[in-house]
Amino acid sequence: MVQTSPSPGPPAGAGPRSADLFDWWAPSGETPISAVPAPRRSPEEPPTERLVLDGGARSTVVLPYIPSASAGRTRSLRAWMLALPIDLVALLAPIAWDQKYWKGSVAVALVAAVAFAVGGLYRARRHVSVLDEIPQLYFRFLAATAVVAIAVATRHNSIDYVDGFLRLAAASAVLLLPARAISRMAVLVARRRRWVEHGAIILGGGPIAIELARLLRRYPQYGLRFAGFVDVPTTAHLKRESNPLVGHLEDLEELVRYTECDVVIIADIDCPESQLLRAVRAPGLAETDLWMVPRLREFPGSVGSPDHIGAIPVVPLRRPTLSGPKWAVKRTADVLFASVALLLLSPILLFCAVGSFLEGGKGIIFRQQRIGRYGKPFSLMKFRSMRPVDEAESQTNWNIGHDPRVGPFGRFMRRTSLDELPQLWNILRGDMTVVGPRPERPYFVDRFSVDYPEYAMRHRVPVGLTGLAQVSGLRGDTPISDRARFDNYYIENWSLWLDAKVILRTVAEVFRGGGR
């Protein structure tokens, strides 16, 4: 329950206490907050109302005086929603003058829009300036036009046709600049009038964090409503400029929800990386934009035009894409791959089944409980490659290389990874994916998660038939900490091309016999 802490009464003539200034902050079903209206002050001056959450000594917080009425309505708005339609109108407008080359113009518009998106030209920027975007804008437009022009020249052997197409593309290029200027001016006007803004909290309270807060209060064109500072162990927040303090780093997920913020800026942070990662990886921050002030500001690390607030550079932190259209493509590719592989590899599957039966008798398929995405158990299938053991031993015994229970044929299947082929059925069922962290037994997941804090983070994605750690030589009796680092690197840098590279390296490992 949120309550106001003791504070002086309102000054004479100030009128009754307002009952709705902080209604936005109180969770559903709780008593709204009332506060004393503060005297009129400069936009740069921090607010002074103090509030207490649950009455704890560490939970004293200071919240902004007047929240933005538009913040809740604009949380879902994104930069591309305005820029993309205006760009397409500019790129397609020349068709109205000459319909003969409409197919080429449509192709240029689509290819250019994709190139703009890949180059980050539809991402939200704090410093909005069309002049900053001109180099990338026209470089990518010219590249798109060149690609389409090659296709047009191949299809039409007429020089006059290609010439006409290029004239229409030139008209699109002329219209592209004023179109961008219009969309950027519209964004600036909406921000300055606070029609569109997003709540932001700043991690830290040092000089850079204080200056950022001042800039956000004074200049609404950055599109951010400053909601307060988040405390870290190395920051005292004793100065007036380092307030309002809304809470502590370990409560970041809850603070983002209560302050209705969807932007977190990391500045002046001097705390262990593991503590910071644990806070920003919380599920409640999945839809939150993360920005960071680089520590070595004299050495810019981003390509293209860097973003900044005032003279302070800010860098958007890349978040792993764990859902959406790309993951739908990944799942579709998994189903197609597993179906085709089961059909084409059926003779090899039969060969492995016969070899397992001759060496170990009945029970050629070995089923074992493993942990999948979000910690859910499933039954994994493999060809049996060693003499049977009891269930308790199979769940808790760590297999190592040169295990005496592994026969010659089982060792051959392990070295070529053929014993993993039945997991294609697990992929069809949706228990697994083709590329992902390798699944492990519940006993070892619990044990490794305690010993290695990063290990549990592997289960953010489906487990895989092969993975980056395995093709990097981390199989069998290799350090668990190294495997966890490689698996988390894969998750945080995932792309369809990275999956393709892992698959190609897996094929090379199979032919090289580099299995365990």
Image (cartoon, grey):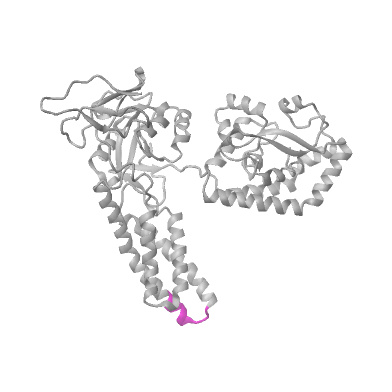
Residue 385 horizontal side relative to residue 83, left or right: right
Residue 114 lies, with reference to residue 299, above or below; the image says below
Residue 338 lies, with reference to residue 15, above or below; the image says below
The answer to whether residue 281 is visible is no
Examine the image and state in which quarter residue 59 appears: top left
Q: Residue at x 66, y 36 (%)?
A: 439
Examine the image and state in which quarter residue 389 appears: top right
- Residue toward you, 426 or 394: 426
- Residues shaded magenta: 156-165
Quadrant where the C terminus is found in the figure: top right
- Inspect the magenta stretch and tell me whether residue 162 lies in it: yes
* Main SS, magenta residues: helix
- Inspect the magenta stretch and tell me whether residue 75 lies in it: no
In the rendered picture of this protein, how many numbered marks are placed on residues? 0
Residue 90 lies, with reference to residue 161, above or below; the image says above
Q: Residue at x 44, y 78 (%)?
A: 100
Quadrant where the N terminus is found in the figure: top left
Examine the image and state in which quarter residue 13 appears: top left
